[in-house]
Image (tube, rainbow, N blue to C red):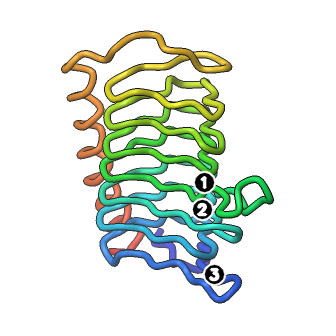
Amino acid sequence: MTQTRTDITIAAIHGKAPRIHSSAFIAPGCRIIGDVEIGPDVSIWYNCVVRADVNRVVIGARTNIQDGSVVHCDSPKPARPEGHATLIGEDCLIGHMAMVHGCTLEDRAFVGLGAIVMDGSVIESEGMLAAGAMLTGKRIGAGQLWMGRPAKFARDLDAAARAANQAGVRGYVQNGRDHAAALGLG
């Protein structure tokens, strides 16, 4: 059965509307609200929420945000008048049920299943936060793996692990195209 986009919410708030590249796959059940920019070949999977009502969210090309994840931003506060936007680079993997809030993920960053990335945190290029981990205002260095709650440095990722993550990115781009076609969205 082919579904339509009637079960997807894409809405403006405070005069700012989502800007979604035509090649992006937005799965049924998603809610995309406010000052959100979604780049080419991005895939936002089933039942995700991307809400930019108090700041902005940017999602770079070929990034995927997997089923049930929440992406939000941090509002301005007296101690930090600009708040924390959520800036997600290109070729990032964000696992199922992740929470990404007011942080920066540089190109090729990886957030594991069920992981939480909190306000002010940074995951540098090819850095990885393990499944179930929680990063609280810290910086994961380029090519590092952090684990635990709170997350701590575990080890440097080898070339094979970094290559496997990028193969995952390519797989999700194709899988998004396949799902869009199957649902009659592409």
Identify the residue position indicated by label 3 in the image.
11
Instruction: Specify whether 40 is left or right of 32.
Output: left
Q: Position of residue 66 (x, y in %)?
A: 49, 47
Circle 2: element type: strand
Judge by depth and name the residue closer to the eye, 23 or 153.
153
Q: Is residue 141 above or below residue 186?
A: above
- What is the C-alpha distance between the residues marked 3 and 2? 11 Å
Task: Check disc 3: other Cα within 10 Å, few if <14, some if 14-19, many if 20+.
Answer: some
Residue under label 1, please give it: 71
SS at mark 3 in the image: strand
For marks 2 and 1, the one nearer the N-term is 2
Determine the secondary structure under disc 1. Answer: strand
Mark 2 and mark 1 residues within 8 Å of each other at the beta carbon: yes
Among all residues in the image, which is located at the extreme top?
154
Q: Earlier in the sequence, mark 1 or mark 3?
A: 3
Image point (39%, 36%), residue name: 124
Disc 2 from disc 1: Cα separation = 5 Å
Left or right: 80 as drawn, with respect to 18? right
Residue at horizontal 67 percent and vertical 19 percent from the top: 149
The reply to whether callout 1 and callout 3 are in contact (CB within 8 Å) is no
What residue is shown with label 2? Answer: 50
